[in-house]
Image (cartoon, rainbow, N blue to C red):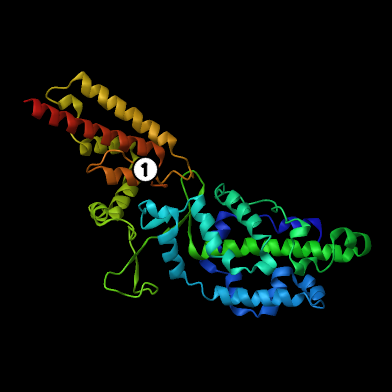
Amino acid sequence: MDGEDYLAKFRGPTFNALIEFAAMKKHSLIREVEVRSPTELSAIVVGVSVYEVLREMPECNILVHAMERVKRKQSRLEKNKIFLWMDENLPSKGVPPLMNQHYMRKADMRLFLARCPMSVLPNSVFKPFIPIVKNFLLAHLYKFRRNRMLYRGPPDFPPEDQLPRVINAFGTVEYLENNYPHLARVKQEMIVNITHFIITYCLDWICEVLTLRSDVYGFVTYSYPAFEMLDDGGNPWSQEGAHFLRSGPEYPRKRRAELERFDYNDNYRHKRARKERTTADPQNVNAEELETAGPSTSKSSTPTNQLASLIEAEQQSASSLVGEISPCGDDALLKGSAVQDDWTDMLDMVLTDPDLPSQYKTMIQRLVATNRDLKNAISQMKSEA
């Protein structure tokens, strides 16, 4: 393998390429594992030319037996079981889902990679490569932008003393370079091909199970559906026994009832329509927002300096809160309103909506803050009267 071919293997896919792959599933390694024999899979993992050399050696049986285990383990992975495990075990389960989806942070992705694709790969061949590939993917997945490649170079490779027996069967690199340069290139190609196989296999599982989107900042996000078990004792591992819902089973009934009072789908359609109207005439939309937010301070019967200062302080805190939200940070889904009232659920959803521009978030926060302060002022005046 020459240098150009070596680097071409590690020029990562674009966002559009992953979306197209998720829709078509063309050349998926998951499908290859399903239909290919262990011998054919061995040639895919190490490369056809490498396998032609390796097949004459007794260590080839290690690779073939490892591929048998890959086929057997992958056959046990069912999509519904994966979804249910994620909904019950990932840290993001503690954050209320947005539009029936849990958005994954880096800690969630780490657990998903370890549980799903990498648990299929036997240690006899893949052990020293797995932690390297896992860290490589985590470092790039959460810096991934829709208009760029996922990665542009290879990860580090394991040191020679940690390589599995099936690779070191050729001998040390120093010995091969001095005596058998051709076998030295074969060994290097084998290491590159195994690394590339693991990366591609993990990306195939990400496209198979997760939903990929691009937020308003161009960063790629990863999410999975929220599940809830049937209350009638249905089979939790079947389509009839698990349902996609806006909240998972971990949320208490009281919290679930509060979420039901706010229709996420209707609100989302309202926001999209409002966004389209804003593009046509922003002034009209601002006027509508002010009308629906409640009475203005100019119409209040006894406005006070205290009320004005409260509104100003609330607006400043709202602006600072929006400024703290990272375009793709781990805490984006944890931001919310500290006040618990009828506006809380709507404000939480607005702040966690990746498709809503920050200026609209600020405007909505200020309107909510004004409405809250007016409500408090009216209550205070009634109590004093």
* Residue 197 vertical position relative to residue 347 in the rendered view, above or below: below
Which quadrant of the rendered structure holds the N terminus?
bottom right
Residues 253 and 331: in front is 253
Q: Which residue is drawn at 23% across and 54% down?
A: 254
Q: Extreme front residue here?
A: 161
Q: State how many labels appear.
A: 1
* Residue 129 vertical position relative to residue 312 in the rendered view, above or below: below
Q: Residues within 10 Å of mark 1 (few under 14, many from 20)?
A: many
Visible residue check, residue 75: yes
Determine the image quadrant of residue 199: bottom right
Determine the image quadrant of residue 123: bottom right
In this rendering, position of residue 36 left or right of residue 96? right
The residue to which callout 1 is attached is 351
Q: Extreme left residue here?
A: 385
Determine the image quadrant of residue 83: bottom left
Visible residue check, residue 221: no
Q: Extreme right residue here?
A: 179
In this rendering, position of residue 372 left or right of residue 365? left
Q: Which residue is drawn at 31% across and 36% down?
A: 365
Q: Residue at x 13, y 22 (%)?
A: 302
- Secondary structure, mark 1, is helix
In this rendering, position of residue 176 left or right of residue 129? right
How far across and how far down the image is residue 233, in percent?
A: 29, 74
How far across and how far down the image is residue 185, in percent?
A: 84, 62
Q: Which residue is drawn at 38% across and 75% down?
A: 238
How far across and how far down the image is residue 128, in percent?
A: 69, 60
Give the amino acid type for the residue marked by disc 1 in the picture: Leu
How far across and how far down the image is residue 188, in percent?
A: 79, 61
Which quadrant of the rendered structure holds the C terminus?
top left
In this rendering, position of residue 14 left or right of residue 335? right
